[in-house]
Image (cartoon, grey):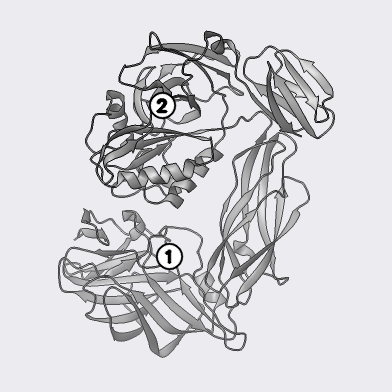
């Protein structure tokens, strides 16, 4: 008989989910949390978990188990070492009699070791083993068993990390079948059991780093630096102050780089390799990052030291701006905090276009019908504050929805660091089309004319749609949690195109469209912005509506009619060439000393013989580029 399992975040409502059959997931072992010591008596801590963040229960009384697995390939490396100490991080109502258990298989009740203990609820419990357990080189499971006497108990403490298939194993004993019903917490979008143990012995590794994660752009502009970011974990018994890496691009000789750091045993550390490597020719290359040594010593387990990713180097990549669509209403007490987060992130930068939809938690005087239509991007329950970046589902990057990973592009705004990470990820995605905006506003008729134009550098993979928004800032009104004189900014006022955009005709890699719209007399043009973006639209799949690229600018209040005839362009340099995206008449290239290098008309690529700093004057507008 299967039972239901209740998973509950601390200080939140419990969530009832259906239990699932045990599935053993195959994944490389993420060694964990060694903590250490001296060269004379080596000891280290082993776990897969972080701090206690949540607590779970089954909604019934009975016996439960929470364990972690040490697979055979790891146990063999530590053969002869002894488990001397055990930690259990627990939830509520977990203070009953319990036992520490060590056993070989989930399919057997035979215990290799057991020790009766009494736990204290809602904290870490540190327990010395009465008899140290010696590892024999075979894989095993270690954890605890206890009896739950209340149906509303949530005794098992879990962390907020991504679940590791070796660290997220729980079970409820089924009386009818007289067997344990094992579960993986990953099936319920939870993390790892808060379980740790200490290993002691003479043969523990002294130098062992695990390359846990590496982030490299999938697309990079040829000639630009290919920056590499990653995370390593010290899974040995000695602290580490530096390690050596080799970065190999395609068949080229590796580039060596030493990372200086301070990583205690069992701790993780982020590293960055910036301004060191670049790809000088267009093409697709395998980029390999490898830890070659640790403080000059060989890594004792090189199997977890290498990461490889395919990178596409292209000369004609164009700069990207991200479209950030926030969902907020005046009734939302937490929304002012989200507004502050977005304001701080955007401070001093111009690569984030911000739109606030007054929807998601009721509606207010700033709500428009299009914003209500965009609630479909939630993929389920709506709430505020929430955010959507380039209409891309970021669940794989950790974005969370109402009760788990985001089902659609919309996700909850939790903290500034997470939002910043999601924005950086979005900006790292390649842009294959330029977006330029010219606008004219006639103050007498209140008619706004917006021209959007540009070019694609490749054939876009899916049908593009042009979207144009106008937003307004500086509006003083009530805001729950902000008072009666709260300033509302970036509120969407109108959609000049269709709600989901108008299909865009790109001919010979060029497009050019113009829209007109009469602004309401209640709006202040001096506080308005025009936002244009190109996206795909799929009415059957909310996760297939990604934005290709975005541009935004202040509404051109009281400008002359001639303004719209001047073509805006994008200018950049790479791989010994200067690139100009957009429509223009004449471009002049000057050396930094003022010498005229060349004059071109309408060309998108300009060859330049020497590296250096150049001034490119396009129809009277100047741009500085560096080769």
Mark 2 falls on what kind of element?
Answer: helix
Local packing at callout 1 (Cα closer than 10 Å; few below 14, some 14-19, many 20+) is many
Residue 171 percent across, percent down from the top left: 28, 67
The disc label shown at residue 605, or none: none
Secondary structure at badge 1 equals: loop
Q: Is residue 570 above or below residue 585?
A: below
Q: Is residue 95 visible?
A: yes
Locate residue 273, reporting x and y percent.
Answer: 66, 53
Q: Local crowd at mark 2 within 10 Å, few (<14), some, or many (≥20)?
A: some
Label number found at residue 166: 1
Q: Is residue 270 left or right of residue 68?
A: right
Q: Nearer the viewer, residue 520 or 27?
A: 520
The residue under label 2 is 527
Q: Vertically, is 389 above or below 121? A: above
Residue at the extreme bottom of the image, as rendered: 130
**Residue 113 in the figure: left or right of residue 462:** left
The residue closer to the viewer here, 16 or 385, is 385
Q: Is 92 situated above or below 459?
A: below
Does 348 sit above or below residue 151?
above
Name the one closer to the observer, 218 or 559. 559
Picture quadrant of residue 113: bottom left
Dot 1 or dot 2, earlier in sequence = 1
Q: What separation in Å lies between label 1 and label 2 (alpha carbons)?
A: 55 Å
Q: Position of residue 95 (x, y in %)?
A: 23, 79
Where's the C terminus, which quadrant?
top right
Q: Residue at x 42, y 57 (%)?
A: 162
Q: In which quadrant is the N terminus drawn?
A: bottom left
The spot of residue 367 in percent (x, y) is: 27, 28
Residue at the (47%, 21%) spot, across then down: 464
């Amino acid at each position: 008989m299967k039972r239901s399992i209740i998973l509950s975040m601390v200080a939140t409502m419990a969530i009832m989910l259906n239990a699932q059959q045990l599935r053993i997931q195959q994944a490389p072992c993420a060694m964990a949390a060694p903590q250490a010591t001296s060269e004379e008596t080596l000891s280290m801590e082993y776990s897969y978990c972080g701090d206690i963040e949540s607590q779970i229960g089954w909604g019934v009384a009975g016996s439960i188990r929470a364990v972690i697995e040490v697979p055979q390939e790891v146990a063999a490396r530590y053969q002869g070492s002894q488990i001397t100490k055990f930690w259990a991080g627990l939830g509520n109502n977990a203070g009953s009699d319990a036992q520490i258990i060590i056993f070989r298989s989930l399919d057997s009740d035979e215990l290799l070791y057991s020790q009766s203990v009494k736990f204290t609820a809602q904290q870490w419990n540190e327990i010395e083993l009465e008899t140290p357990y010696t590892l024999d080189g075979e894989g095993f499971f270690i954890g605890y068993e206890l009896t739950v006497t209340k149906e509303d108990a949530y005794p098992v403490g879990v962390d907020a990390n991504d679940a590791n298939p070796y660290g997220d194993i729980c079970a409820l004993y089924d009386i009818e079948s007289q067997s344990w019903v094992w579960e993986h917490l990953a099936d319920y979008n939870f993390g790892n059991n808060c379980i740790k143990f200490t290993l002691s012995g003479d043969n523990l590794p002294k130098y062992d780093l695990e390359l846990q994660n590496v982030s490299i752009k999938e697309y990079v502009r040829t000639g630009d630096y290919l920056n590499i970011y990653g995370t390593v974990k010290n899974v040995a018994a000695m602290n580490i102050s530096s390690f050596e890496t080799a970065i190999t691009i395609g068949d080229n000789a590796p580039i060596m780089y030493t990372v200086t750091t301070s990583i205690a045993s069992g701790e993780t550390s982020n590293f960055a390799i910036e301004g060191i490597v670049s790809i000088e020719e267009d093409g697709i290359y395998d980029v390999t990052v490898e830890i070659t040594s640790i403080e000059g010593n060989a890594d004792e387990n090189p199997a977890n030291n290498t990461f490889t990713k395919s990178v596409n180097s292209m000369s004609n990549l164009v700069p990207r701006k991200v479209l950030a669509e926030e969902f907020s209403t005046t009734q939302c007490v937490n929304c002012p905090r989200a507004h502050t987060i977005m304001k701080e992130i955007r401070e001093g930068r111009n690569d984030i276009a911000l739109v606030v939809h007054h929807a998601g938690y009721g509606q207010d005087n700033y709500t428009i019908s299009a914003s209500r239509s965009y609630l479909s991007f939630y993929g389920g329950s709506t709430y505020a504050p929430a955010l959507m970046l380039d209409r891309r589902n970021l669940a794989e990057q950790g974005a969370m929805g109402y009760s788990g990973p985001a089902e659609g592009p919309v996700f909850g705004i939790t903290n500034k660091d997470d939002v910043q990470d999601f924005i950086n990820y979005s900006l790292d995605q390649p842009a294959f089309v330029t977006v330029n905006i010219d606008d004219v506003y006639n103050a007498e008729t209140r008619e706004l004319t917006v021209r959007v134009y540009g070019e694609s550098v490749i054939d876009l993979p899916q049908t593009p749609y042009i979207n144009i928004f106008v937003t307004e800032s500086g509006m003083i009104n009530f805001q729950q949690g902000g008072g009666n004189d709260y300033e509302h900014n970036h509120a969407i006022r109108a959609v000049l195109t269709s709600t989901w955009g108008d299909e865009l005709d790109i001919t010979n890699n060029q497009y050019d469209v113009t829209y007109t719209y009469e602004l309401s007399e209640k709006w202040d043009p001096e506080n308005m912005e025009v936002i244009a973006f190109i996206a795909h639209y799929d009415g059957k799949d909310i996760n297939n509506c990604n934005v290709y690229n975005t541009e935004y600018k202040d509404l051109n209040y009281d400008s002359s009619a001639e303004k719209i005839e001047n073509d805006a362009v994008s200018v950049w340099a790479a791989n010994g060439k200067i690139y100009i995206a957009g429509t223009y008449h004449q471009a002049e290239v000057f050396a930094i000393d003022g010498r005229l290098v060349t004059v071109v008309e309408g060309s998108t690529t300009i060859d330049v013989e020497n590296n250096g700093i150049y001034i490119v004057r396009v129809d009277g507008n100047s741009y500085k580029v560096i080769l």
